[in-house]
Amino acid sequence: MYIYNRTTSKYQIQLAKKIKRFFSINSQSSINNKAVRIEVKIDNHIQPLQWLHQQKSISKIYWSDRENQFEIAGVGEADVEFGHKTIEYSQLFAKLNSRLSSSYKNLRYYGGISFNQTSKKEPSWQNFGNYRFVLPKFEVYSENNETYLACNFLLKDSLDHHLQLTQLLFELESLVFNQAFHPISLPMLLSRKDFPNASEWQRNIHAALTSFAQGKTTKIVLARKSIFEFSEEIEPLSLLLLLKKSNPNLFHFCFQPSCGNAFIGASPERLYKRVERLLLTEAVAGTRPRSNSLTKDKYLSQELLTSEKDIREHRLVVDTVRGVFNHLCHSLETEKEPVILKLKKVQHLYTSCQGVLLDKFSDADILPKLHPTPAVGGYPKKQALIAINELETFDRGWYAAPVGWIGHNSAEFAVAIRSGLVENNRLSLFSGAGIVQGSKPEDEWQEIENKLGSFMEIIRHSTIPNNVVLSA
């Protein structure tokens, strides 16, 4: 049933034996469509992202946390929850939780939702839908300095178990373990276009400032979409590998539902993490660039800490998070004053927050309460979203939306900022700036350029003809 050849690794053989043993023991039992996970320990020298780069599967998923404690590379789809209709959070989480169990603590669904559930979806985002959560069929994952190869599947009573076993072993056989890793560089850059352009951006900022004067809103986060066209197809995981190498202490992700189509990013911002009833979140708002000069860098940090405009913008996020936690939790701990979060290209005001979740609440309550925070939407939330829909001419899709994972009795979501959408030979980069009273169009435009710095640095190393203007 399972044919070994010269390229078959010992880990595939070990996993195949455990899968066959499981089916032999459970051939007559009813699993009731619960998800099953079988795993074997493998050598730590196998890097999940490099392994994923070599696989031939159409569907790929990558996730690594900000602390570099957990990393997963997944191929194939053991199960998918996907839809274009507006999310019913309670129904979605109930479905996912019905397939999870305490027997498999490392089994997780990975995915995300769209920023705005009601906006019309552009063709670019059709494969992602309003929500998409995937249980990968095969994974290489690392946690606490140990690495594993895992197989996930739903043992469906309606299907012949022998056929399921045969298909699983066939797909396991096709995994690649022994090939040399060769990252692919970016092809030649042909053009760049910004939406909105500089003059349209100025009009949007002035419209936002007018709404503040009229008392409609206090803050609106306006985003920009920059489309880079290359001479050949972009390899998403090669691009993500370069991002991860240059910015290691961030959330890194890749969601690839089909060939040539992937959403990737390197985000500094956690939306929330839940471990049983412990709930963690943070506020990240207020920005300055970094400097190679230590003196100048300290000056920029101090300027940020004393900026009335940035502190006001940050306080909106903190107060909103506190309000949500006061509703969801029976205890709350938060820092009294913001600190500086230093990244490679930019630095932010940062405040952490944690609480103990009330028994009556779950992820289905947390996610819609926290998203979108004033850091990516604005304040008040409803009015800010209306303004975004009126002023932005493109579909944000999953940009600035929650992406992450759901497991048994735990979950973690990042805010998908500093992100890009790959469509064959096009890369659309997204970033935003918080507009408050006192904002200046040229300063906010430059802030977006700074936030895209890691992507731009990689693009600059591609071959750029003389007639292509890289800066906006």
Image (cartoon, grey):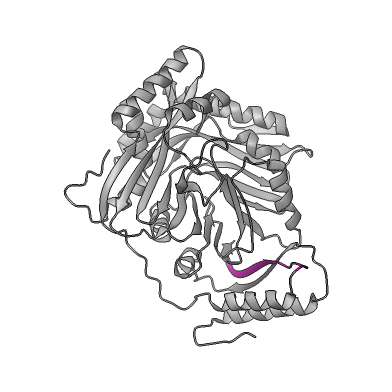
Give the main secondary structure, helix, strand or loop, of the magenta stretch.
Answer: strand
Asked whether residue 371 is in view, the answer is yes
Q: Quadrant of residue 279?
A: top right
Q: Residue at position x 43%, y 27% from top?
A: 391
Q: Percent from the top left, x then y, of residue 185?
A: 32, 62
**Of residues 405 and 134, which is closer to you in this image?**
134
Q: Percent from the top left, x then y, of residue 364?
A: 69, 41
Horizontal side, residue 22 vs residue 431: left or right: right
Q: Outermost residue toward the top?
A: 214
Query: Vertically, is 93 above or below 118?
Result: below
Query: Vertically, is 315 above or below 167?
Result: above
Q: Quadrant of residue 353?
A: top right
Magenta stretch holds residue 367: no
**Of residues 188 and 314, which is closer to you in this image?**
188
Q: Which residues are magenta?
A: 147-158
Horizontal side, residue 359 vs residue 119: left or right: right
Asked whether residue 315 is in view, the answer is no
Horizontal side, residue 334 vs residue 184: left or right: right
Q: Percent from the top left, x then y, of residue 239?
A: 39, 57
Tally the numbered discs. 0
Q: Outermost residue toward the left?
A: 466
Query: Vertically, is 330 above or below 31?
Result: above
Quarter the N terminus occupies? bottom right
Q: Percent from the top left, x then y, of residue 219?
A: 48, 23
Q: Outermost residue toward the right?
A: 29
Magenta stretch holds residue 153: yes
Q: Residue at position x 49%, y 59% from top?
A: 258
Q: Residue at position x 67%, y 32% from top?
A: 325
**Of residues 108 and 247, which is closer to you in this image?**
108
